[in-house]
Image (cartoon, rainbow, N blue to C red):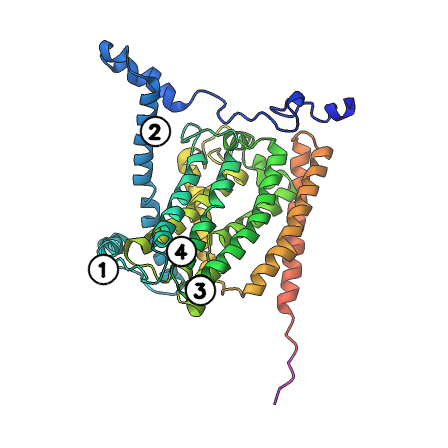
Amino acid sequence: MSDFRAMFVGFPNFNISEGFFPNINLQEKLNWAEEFIQNVLIPRLPEAIAAHFPVELGTVLVMFACAGIFVGVVPLLPLFLVLAERKVAARFQNRTGPMRVGPWGTLQTLADGIKLIFKEDFIPPQGDKLLFLLAPYIIFACSFAVFAAIPFGQNILVSPFNIGIFYIMAISSVIVMGVIMAGWSSNSKWSLLGSLRSAAQIVSYEIPLGLSILTVVMLVESLNMQEIVASQSNGVFSWLIFRTPFTFIAFFIFFISAIAEVNRTPFDLPEAESEIVAGFHTEYSGMRFALFFIAEYANMFAVSAIAVTLFLGGWEGALPGYDILGGLPGFVIKTLALVFLMMWLRWTLPRLRVDQLMNLCWKYFIPIAFFNILGTGIWGLIFPEDTLVSIIISCAIIYIGLIVAYTIAGRTLAQKPEPQPSSV
């Protein structure tokens, strides 16, 4: 029994007398809204009001105000990203893209949004009206709730959850229920097929995505997003993507799985227009249709921000002591770089088949993700502390691995396909 107790020595917030359930504290310190009320708002109120002003009421009002600002600002991201994607697509296809509305077409997405507001709000007469109306709002709300736990800077965070990454995964997994509701309630075979594809795809790719996150949690020994960023504060080589060869692989598995999670090409089978018209949102029109697009582009930015936080240093700079790619501007630049990579892949790669999509997840990503977890554990035993030697060895292994992968890929692509016998 003493050996069993010794297993949990040093495990955070674990009390052996309470059984196998650790005592998790969701907030490590006083809520920032309460600090604002006590230190900023109440001292500025008249004494008669300040003496009887309840802190709880002020906290609720501040949180409502921040939520209103948040909901008003975050939808501007899709407004910018839709225009950016149309310009990127035009550049890839040797076109100019939207140029008529506003200077260089910068007001095109705003005009499209106004148009959608005034379009007819059609509801299928034979569908489930309640679920049909709720589905876009569930997807929209869950997509935006994820931003509450993403630290955009050292002091730019809505809520400092002690289990921030766990909260993000829990909230984002609810989106698939909204997609299924949209497909089922539309009373359309195209919508139903799209929603079933989405359920299979999102649930499948959540597994390698979560396992990739687990490699980061094993190294940092925390679920707190701020602590994960703080562990990468010694420059670019302290970023978790370079910390071990296994987290380098985990980053790419996470990023590709995240593309599948947000239904982006080449994983956009739930809304494949060449097969099922538009998938789960075929029957939607007007502003409800726009909510799906807002949620999709918000998810693109969110998963890119999470990847930056977990693997690319978050708001920490590339050089220790210098604010290069650091702070809020650096965080946004790194996030937009990953968003641009998603757009690049969309206009470069063809769509996968359903069997190829599932094979990639279950036959390759999940076994590799388990291998990463095993390798991260062994690496932690060999190098319990991050030193210059461990970083050099990690970067050397990554460099050699990239050369080997490039050589194998080059030889594979250089091979001429064998001629197939004619069926005539």
Residue 43, position as x, y percentages in the image: 29, 13
Q: Distance between the Cα atoms at labels 4 and 3? A: 16 Å
- The total number of labels drawn is 4
Q: Distance between the Cα atoms at labels 4 and 1? A: 34 Å
Quadrant for the N terminus in the image = top right
Q: Residue at x 69, y 47 (%)?
A: 371
Q: Which residue is mark 4?
A: 182
Q: Amino acid at mark 1?
A: Arg
Q: Which residue is mark 1?
A: 100
Label 1 neighbourhood size at 10 Å, few (<14), some (14-19), many (20+)? Answer: few
- The mark nearer the N terminus, 4 or 1, is 1
Q: Distance between the Cα atoms at labels 3 and 2? A: 39 Å
Label 4 or label 3, whichever lies nearer to me, is: 4
Label 3 or label 1, whichever lies nearer to me, is: 3
Does the image show residue 384? yes
Residue 183, disc? none
**In contact (CB < 8 Å): disc 1 and disc 2:** no
Q: Distance between the Cα atoms at labels 4 and 2? A: 30 Å
- Judging from the image, what secondary structure is the residue with disc 4 in? helix
**In contact (CB < 8 Å): disc 3 and disc 1:** no
Label 2 neighbourhood size at 10 Å, few (<14), some (14-19), many (20+)? Answer: some
- The mark nearer the N terminus, 3 or 2, is 2
Label 1 or label 2, whichever lies nearer to me, is: 2
Q: Which residue is mark 3?
A: 272
**In the image, which residues are magenta?**
419-424
Residue 200, position as x, y percentages in the image: 54, 56
